[in-house]
Image: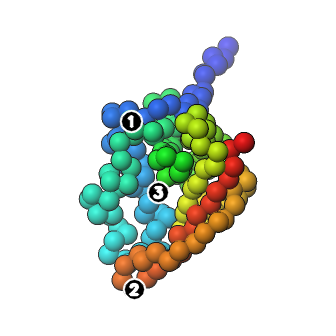
Amino acid sequence: MSNVIAMPRLVIRPGTETDRDAVVALVSGIWRETYALHLPPESTPAPEAAHIPDLVGDPAERGWVATLGDRVIGYGSVTANCVDQIWVPAPMRRRGIGSAILDRAIKDIRERGFTFAQAGCEDFNQPARQFLEAKGWHLIASQPQPLGDGRSCNALVFSRPLT
């Protein structure tokens, strides 16, 4: 006789203050992977102590966590009509997690009366760019962004209507 073990299901829920440490740990790992080849070598082994917590902000303020059971596997946040962040670790990508976070962010932006949304990423972040373009976002602007140590990239701005 076999026992069926229920698999945890993906849940997108509002972030809480108690999620902060898990979100900071999640984003720290993804940050290193994403920026390692593009920032000065001394800054990639560990981001500045304050950088990731400042980047994450307060998950309880317009932030959402994606969980499987008790495990935080994604994070997203918005400010005004901008999707500020979507973070999903590489092994968990292409499973609908980023899409679910983006859908929740768009719902929040739409509920507050905006008719367009914006999002951005650096030009070297091909997975983020491909994700946004596959979701119907259009590149509307690009501006140089210094990365330190004489390095730079272009910050890309995407937009899409919410109608």
Q: Viewer-nearest of labels 2 and 3?
A: 2
Whole-angstrom CA distance, mark 3 to mark 1, is 21 Å
Mark 2 residue crowding within 10 angstroms, few (<14) / some (14–19) / many (20+): few
The answer to which of marks 1 and 2 sits earlier in the sequence is 1
- From this view, report whether residue 69 is shown above or below residue 157: above
> Most extreme residue toward the left, as rendered?
49
Whole-angstrom CA distance, mark 1 to mark 2, is 36 Å
Mark 3 residue type = Ile
Q: Secondary structure at mark 3?
A: helix
- Determine whether, in the image, residue 39 is placed left or right of residue 115: left
Where's residue 81, x and y in %? 54, 48
Do residues under tags 1 and 2 come within 8 Å of each other at their CB atoms? no
The answer to which of marks 3 and 1 sits earlier in the sequence is 3
Which residue is painted at 64% across and 45% down in the image? 115
Which residue is painted at 48% across and 38% down in the image? 64
| Residue that badge 2 annotates | 150
Query: Could you tell me if residue 89 is visible in this image?
Result: yes
Mark 3 residue crowding within 10 angstroms, few (<14) / some (14–19) / many (20+): some
Where's residue 75, x and y in %? 48, 44
User: Which image quarter holds the C terminus?
Assistant: top right
Mark 2 residue type = Gly
| Residue that badge 1 annotates | 60
Mark 1 residue type = Ala
Residue 30 is tagged as 3
> Most extreme residue toward the top, as rendered?
1
Do residues under tags 2 and 3 come within 8 Å of each other at their CB atoms? no
- Determine whether, in the image, residue 71 is placed left or right of residue 139: left
> Most extreme residue toward the bottom, as rendered?
150
Q: Secondary structure at mark 2?
A: loop
User: Which image quarter holds the N terminus?
Assistant: top right
